[in-house]
Amino acid sequence: SQKIEQNSEALNIQEGKTATLTCNYTNYSPAYLQWYRQDPGRGPVFLLLIRENEKEKRKERLKVTFDTTLKQSLFHITASQPADSATYLCALVRGYALNFGKGTSLLVTP
Amino acid sequence: DVKVTQSSRYLVKRTGEKVFLECVQDMDHENMFWYRQDPGLGLRLIYFSYDVKMKEKGDIPEGYSVSREKKERFSLILESASTNQTSMYLCATRTEGQLYGYTFGSGTRLTVV
């Protein structure tokens, strides 16, 4: 069956460091992968989309890599700030809809 | 920016009641989706619609139905609410073409007592 796996354990890092979150998938052949941010009690917010032929994509302090051989995406936040604390979800398309991973909670402490 | 509005942020209903959750988008998007989100289970797709009056079941449609009479509005209906339908319900929309992210509403926290 299709699976999307993200670290269930929260990631705690110090302000200013780089946070790296992992998304692994099985039984997908995705043309692209998406990352979302979700704050408590709110809907997810779209951050980035990376296509299968793109190894890396950047947006401000965010960087996403996509390795279709390893079936893995890495999501980096450089110079992290307490305001980056949230849950981050990766998502893959399945037909018309998206399947989401369960997310990794990131806590950035001052 | 696309705006997706869900009619209620918090809702408390009694077991057996028929419940309507409304979602309205303002950008003429073809595709609309209903998810529920539960701790430890993540986001699960209930139903989606790719056009007016068109609907498709997602992964967990049992106990739910949907209605899309107008392009901008997608309603989720709990035919007879049960306590296991207590959850956060999220509506999302996406324009045609898959190279765009979803836009989500703020969610409705439904409690069935």
Image (spheres, helix red, strand yellow):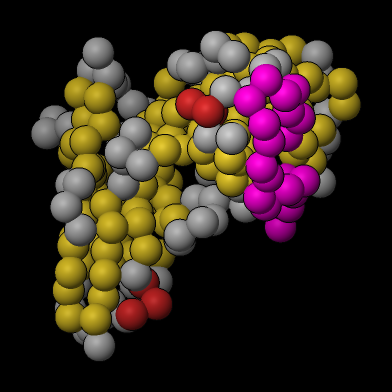
Q: Is B10 placed left or right of B57 in the picture?
A: right
- Classify B49 as above or below A87: above
Taking the view exactly as shown, the residue that stands out farthest to the bottom is A110
Of residue B53 and residue B78, the one placed in the foreground of this image is B78
- Classify A95 as above or below B8: above
User: Percent position (x, y) of residue A10?
Assistant: 20, 58
Q: Is B36 placed left or right of B17 in the picture?
A: left
Q: Is A63 placed left or right of B79 in the picture?
A: left
Magenta segment includes B9: yes
Residue located 51% across and 37% down the image: B87
Of residue A74 and residue B13, the one placed in the foreground of this image is B13
| Quadrant in the picture for the N terminus of chain A | top left
User: Percent position (x, y) of residue A36?
Assistant: 43, 51
Count of labels in the image: 0
User: Percent position (x, y) of residue B35?
Assistant: 54, 32
Residue located 23% across and 17% down the image: A27
- Residue B6 visible from this viewpoint: yes
Stretch in magenta: B1-21
Residue located 57% across and 23% down the image: B82
Image quadrant in which you'd find residue B96: top right
| Quadrant in the picture for the C terminus of chain A | bottom left
Taking the view exactly as shown, the residue that stands out farthest to the left is A70
- Residue B95 visible from this viewpoint: no
Image quadrant in which you'd find residue A28: top left
User: Percent position (x, y) of residue B27?
Assistant: 79, 44
